[in-house]
Amino acid sequence: MSFAVALGGMVFGIAVMPVEIWVRGYMILGALSLVGSTFTLAKTMRDEFEGAKLINQIAQARAEKLLHEYGVKE
């Protein structure tokens, strides 16, 4: 929700800015680039977290298997 409010405020501010149209276009392109890179960063961080979680689950399963095998051999 706050992301939408911030984006809307930024777009409104650019739209009512008392400058020439090419300056507004430049500002809008910069804003779109910022939004795109924000989504890319969020997706990258989520993917890294999910990958680390999977690796930890595999390592935990391997450790449990070794502990189980060690316990059975006693």
Image (cartoon, helix red, strand yellow):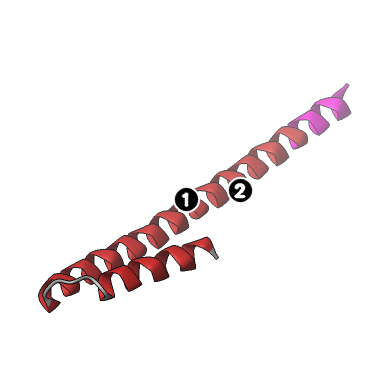
* Residue furthest top as drawn: 74
Question: Badge 2 is on which residue?
Answer: 54
Q: Position of residue 31 (x, y in %)?
A: 28, 65
In what element is the residue under mark 1?
Answer: helix
Residue 28 placement: quadrant:
bottom left
65 or 23, which is in the foreground?
A: 23
Q: CA distance from mark 1 to mark 2?
A: 14 Å
Q: Earlier in the sequence, mark 1 or mark 2?
A: 1
Instruction: Give the residue drawn at x 57%, y 51%.
Output: 50
Residue sitting farthest toward the bottom? 21
Kind of residue at disc 2 = Leu
In this rendering, the answer to whether 6 lies above or below 60 is below
Over which residues does the magenta segment extend?
65-74
The residue pinned by badge 1 equals 45
64 shown above or below 18: above
Residue at 47%, 68% in the rendered image:
4
The percent coordinates of residue 66 (x first, y second) are 74, 31
Three-letter amino acid code at the position of disc 1: Met
